[in-house]
Amino acid sequence: MVKKKIGDLLVEKALITKPQLDECLRDQAISGRRIGEILVDRGYITELQLIETISERLSVPKVSLGSMVIDPRVIQTVPVDIARRYSLIPIFAIGNTLTLVMADPLNIIAIDEIKYLTGKNIKRSIATTTEIVQAIDQYYSVADSLNQIVQSRQKDAMVAAVADVQETRTDSDSPIIRLVDLIISKAVKDKASDIHIEPEEDRLRIRYRISNVMKEEASPPKSMQNELISRIKISANLDVSEKRLPQDGRFGVNIDGASIDLRVSSLPTIHGEKIVIRILDRRNLLLSFGQLGFNPETEAAWKKIIRQPEGLVLISGPTSSGKTSTLYATLQEINSIEKNIITVEDPVEYSLPIINQIQINEKAGLTFPTTLRSMLRQNPDIIMIGEIRDVETARMAIRSSLTGHLVFSTIHTNDAPSAVTRLVDMGVESYLTAAAIKGVLAQRLVRTNCPNCLQRYEPSDVVLQRAGLNRSNADIEFQHSTGCNQCKNTGYHGLVGIYEYVEITPAISELIVNSKSLSAIRREARTSGYVPLFESGMDKVAAGTIRLEELLKETSHAEESPTIPDPTAIGVSNANPV
């Protein structure tokens, strides 16, 4: 049986008309280009429709590269020039079989060349040209430099062997310096928050944290481990010879005209030093409360409380929930030449104008409590304490707030009301806690939907049940993103904060003084407008900003028993996609 041609299949599927096909065939006869390429260029079909048809025609599996993590060792089996020339990329190497993702699975010349080069049998799969080009850029951008470094080092080794000398490259064009620069610049462009350089027994792994999810990057060979780590430590002014103890440092770079601060942490492991580079983009300091994710009601209440002349204002949330960004945005909001603002942080992440910032150094005896005692002699108007970690720091913060200072700090609790009981549990007297605290903001960071590929969908019954909803009362147009070129087929595009705010009213203060339960405090907070994290996030679910599953992942344990609001009360019937 003769298989149908691609054009005929597209006509049969009613994706194009016969006149459109004939027109493109005439173009093909003149230009020599592939028929599918012409159809896509003319806008008659999409690239995805083309590869789905080819996949069916050739019985070749279709692959989504955006959802895959490819082993760097597999990437290195095919040189980058061949990958770009034939629009293909290797994804699996199992035994003697290498699986390629190809834009044109019928390219026998490419298959034969790679079979000869690798000595492996070739298994074909298909993806769009756009996906393959993005994957090549993603995996080979670092791999290209790795190959260059290895080749350069091999050349240096041969020169040293012949001349019986040791050559050291320290110029700014050395491959190792270019590699470090490339790793950092790619992380910044991918909007990563951290770079993790992790030594293992037989390899060196590099991972980026993007939108709170770890993603593997092409890694250098194990032999380059010491050189790479030493270069980073030198840049951060760390002791290169000290490999047994943790160290912390920082340095700055300029990428595409933007000033980027990098905070470096080294940690000794059994296979060598692990390096984590925290990326601090100064452009984030310019974000408004609305851009961070505050709804109008929470923003108005927060702006009111941060302009109080005195008192303790807390921000609560787990690690990597955006507390520091909110603190800096708050200080930027109230900063002025008329105020004396002093911060004590561990570490100082951003340098702020006019504000006096102090870096904790526990080895030198510069702790939160000792620094706070000295700060009070500097006559501050506003004090920011990076984190309340112990009862001594808590007492000093409360004492400062009760003596005419406005004090900001963070604390680790599940929700805003819990911050009050946490201080009492730490050993602070309940009457002091009630007198000092003016308000508590709790927050989480949730991955946002990509606005370019947003579609309606129906969550599973299990997800609805976890959210306290069912199909009969969930009058919400649930939306999620399916993946596109703009979001690298992940379906997500950045992070947004969700917030809950509790103002400590006289009624709540009385409950604290009388050592009432956390549940009683929550109930009283409800009467004064407190909206828990989950309910606050439902506004963003209804607007299509985030998907329900992501909200549940970040807030499922934030409240004891979340009360789901009436969907019509949060405007879901008129929700518009972001």
Image (cartoon, grey):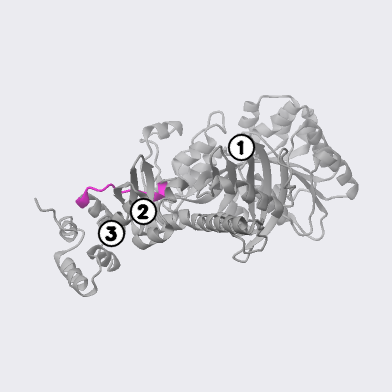
Q: Residue furthest left?
A: 1
Category of crowding for the residue at label 3, using alpha-carbon neighbours closer than 10 angstroms: few (below 14), some (14–19), many (at least 20) = few
Magenta region, residue range: 57-67
Going 34% across and 48% down the picture, which residue do you hit?
119
Going 38% across and 39% down the picture, which residue do you hit?
459
Between 144 and 287, the residue placed more toward the observer is 144
Q: CA distance from mark 2 to mark 3?
A: 12 Å
Looking at the image, residue 431 lies above or below residue 382: above
Location of residue 121 in the rendering, given as x and y in whole percent from the top left corner: 30, 46
Q: CA distance from mark 3 to mark 1?
A: 43 Å
Q: Secondary structure at mark 2?
A: helix
Query: Which labelled disc corresponds to residue 109?
Result: 3
Q: Secondary structure at mark 3?
A: helix
Query: Which labelled disc corresponds to residue 117?
Result: 2
Query: Which labelled disc corresponds to residue 305?
Result: none
Give left or right: position of 52 versus 469: left
Which image quarter: residue 179?
Answer: bottom right
